[in-house]
Amino acid sequence: MKLKGLILGMMVLLWLSPFVYAETKNSTPGTLVMDEVVVTSTRTEHTVMETPSNISVINEQDIQATDAKNMAELIKKLPGVLYTNASGLEPKLSLRGTHIGMSPGAMVLVNGIPISLGKFGYTDYESIPVETIEKIEIIKGPMSSLYGGNSARGVINVITKRSKKNFDGNISVKGGSFNDQRVSALIHGAKDKFDYSLNVKKKKADGYRDDTWLDNIYANGELGFWMSDTTRLGTYINVTDKERSLAKKLTEAQREENPKQATDYSLTDNTDLISGVSLELKKEVYDITSNIYYKNRDKTYRNYLEATSTPYKEDLEEDIWGTRNIFTYKQPIFTKANKLSLGFDYDYDDIDLLTMKAAAKDPDLAYTIKDPKKTGGFSSKMLGLFVQDEFSLLDNLTLTAGLRYDYFEFDNNTEYDFSEGGTYDYNSNPDYDKLNPRLALNYQYSNDMSLYGSYSQSYRAPSIYDYYASGSYSAKNSYVLEPESFTQYEAGVRYRFAKWLNADATVYYLVIEDMLDSAYDTNGKYMGKQNINEATMKGFELALSGRPIDRITYSLAYTYTDAVYSGDFFTKTGDNINGNRVTKVPRHRLNIDLGIQILKIDAGELIWNINVMAQDEFAMDNVNSSFYNGYGLLNSLLRWKHDRYEIFLGVDNILDKDYDGYAYTSYGKNYYYPAPGTTFTLGLEFKF
C-alpha cells in the first residue's frame, strides 16, 4: 500500500505541476537528457522521451564527474542497480536483484558485440577502459524478444568514443591509495572518409587485503570507412591482458582479528580478445545494422593456494564466433508512422577445459590428478530470429510488438562418462527452442511528458558450468536442466517539470520461474542444480535531476525492491524458503550526486562533486537466518577543468565506514569480504 501511495502521489504531482521547461540539448552532469537519442530498447533510434521502457543513460559528462575505475562503478549509481565487489578488484552488477547465485548478470554489448566470456558467462567490467566510453545505455528487465536468452536480466549497451575533429586525444595519469596506478593514452580523429581511435592503458593496484593485487594492460582501437554519407563500414578490436591475486572469505572471528588478512587466495592470468566488423547503413526508407564478431579467452586459474581446500588449477581456452543483424523498414501504414524490423543473431561458443587437482590439502603439492568431470570440450550454439513492429496508433501513441524465436543446442563432452557405461540415461547434447513476446506502449502526452508500459517474456539458458557441475546428479536422477523463465510487467512516467527538476518513475513486477538452484533430498543429500525455485521481484525506481541554480546540479536515484522466493523450495536443513527475502537484495537504496561550480575563470572552472550512497539491510542467506546491516558512504571529487588539462583529487568513504564488499551466510556461519576505509586518488589529464 505504501508503494501504491507513493506512485499515485508522484503521478498527481507530475500532472498538476505548472512548471514546464524545455530542456536544452547541452546537458549537465547527472541530469536526465530526455532528447538524447538511444537505441537499446528497440534496436532502432528514438529519443529517451519516446522510448517504451525504462532506460538510463550515462554520458561523457557523467563519466568525467567521477573517478570510476571501471564500467561497473559508473553504472552502480543508477536506480535498480546493485553493486558487489567481493575481492575489491572484480565488481559485479545485478539489475533489479536478478543476478542470483552463480548465474550471469545482464547482457553487456560494446559497439554491438556481446562481451561475456568464460564457463559462467560473466561480464568482465574491467575489460573496457572507462576512458574510451562515450555513452552507456541501460535497460533493466527481460529483453529476450530482441537480444536472446542472455538478456533476461537486462541489457547494458556501451558506445565508445568517435571524434568528429581531424585529430584530438588525451593522456591521463592517476594514482592513489593501495598503490593504485593508472596511465592511459587516447587518440581519435577523422580524415576524408575515415574515422579512427586508439587507446592503450596500464593499470596496477594492490588490494585492501594482504597478498592481493592486479596488473592489467589494455589496448583497443576502431577504424571506420564512410562509403557514403549514410553508410559506414567499421572494425573494432579490444585486447586485455590481466593478472590478479584475489583473497578468499573471512569468518566473523577472522574479520574482527584483522580484516586485511588473506587466509587463502587465488591467482588468475588471462588474455581476452574481442573483435568485430560492423556495417551501418541509414537511408530514408530503411536502416541496416550488422555485426560479425570473434572473441577469444586464454585463461589459467589457480585456486586455494594456501590449501584451506584442495588446491586445483583450470586451463581454459575459449573461441566465440557470432553475428547480430537487423533490417528496419520505415514506411507509414494508413498514413501512420511505422517501423518494421527483422533480424537474426547467431552465436557459437567453444570451450576446452582442463582441471587438475593436488592429491591433498597441501600448498606445496603439484597438480597431478585430473578431474574428468571438469575436463573436456564444451560448446553451445544459438540461433535467434526476431520481428518487431513499431506502429503509431495516434500521433503521440506508439505500440511496439515483438516476437523472437531462439534455438539453443549444447554439447557437453566431458572426459567422465556421466551415464556410467549406459547405466543411466544422460543427455550430453540437450537442445531447446523458445518463443519470447513483447508488447510496449509509449504515450507522449506533451513535449515534456510521456507514459510508458510493457509486458515481456524472456529466458536464461543453463550455462556450460551448470551442465557439467550437475552432470552426475542429472544422470542418476533422470532430469535435464531447462531454461529459466522471466515474465515482467512495467509502467512508468517521464516528465520535464522545469530546469530544476526532471523525473523518471517506474514500477515493475517480475517473476522468475524454473530457477536453477541447489537441490537436496529429504535426508539433506545434495542432488545437483535443478529447475526447482521461483522468485518474485516488485519494485519502484525513481530518478530525479536538475539545475536549481546556475552553479549547482544534482541527481537522485532511489530504488525500492521487494524480492522474495515465491515457490516451495527446501534447503539442505529442510527449511522451506517460500516467502523469504532473496539474498543480498536490500529493500531500499539511495544515491545522491551534487555538482557545485565553485569558480569559473577564462577557460577553466573548479567543480566539486559530492556523492552519497546508502542502502538498507539485506538477507545473507535464503533461510534469512542472518542479515547484513545497512550502511552509507560519502565520497567527494574536486576537479579543475581547463580546455587543455584537468586535475582532480578524489576521496572515497570520507567517513571511514567499516563495511564489506560482499557478505553471506552458509550453514549457519557468516562470511565476509571486507572493503577499504578512506581512500585517496590524484589525477592529471592533458588534452590535445
Image: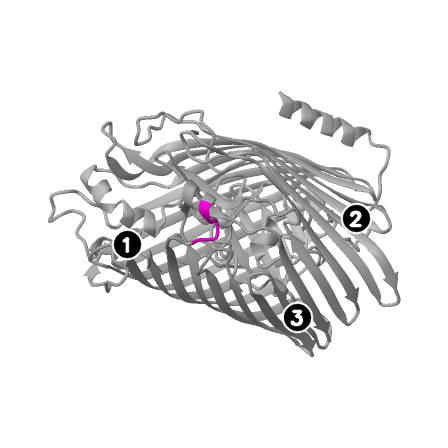
In whole angstroms, how far apart are the C-alphas of marks 1 and 2? Answer: 53 Å
Q: Write the start and end of the magenta stretch as one range.
A: 257-261
Identify which amino acid the numbered label 2 is placed on. Thr
Whether residue 331 appears in magenta in the rendering, the answer is no
Q: Nearer the viewer, mark 1 or mark 2?
A: 2
Quadrant placement of the N terminus:
top right
Residue 336, percent from left and from top? 69, 43
In whole angstroms, how far apart are the C-alphas of marks 2 and 3? Answer: 26 Å
Residue 542, percent from left and from top? 67, 37
Dot 2: element = strand
Say the numbered circle drawn on residue 553. 2
Q: Earlier in the sequence, mark 2 or mark 3?
A: 3
Front residue of 332/322: it is 322
Whether residue 260 appears in magenta in the rendering, the answer is yes
> Residue at the spot x=24%, y=46% of the render?
471
Whether 171 is drawn above or below 343: the answer is below
- Residue 223 in sight from this viewpoint: no
**Residue corresponding to mark 3:** 172
**Residue corresponding to mark 1:** 411
Q: Earlier in the sequence, mark 1 or mark 2?
A: 1
Seen in the image, is 181 located left or right of residue 60? left
Quarter location, residue 264: bottom left
Furthest-top residue in this view: 1
Q: Earlier in the sequence, mark 3 or mark 1?
A: 3
Identify which amino acid the numbered label 1 is placed on. Asp
Colour basis: one colour
Dot 3: element = strand
In whole angstroms, how far apart are the C-alphas of marks 3 and 1? Answer: 46 Å
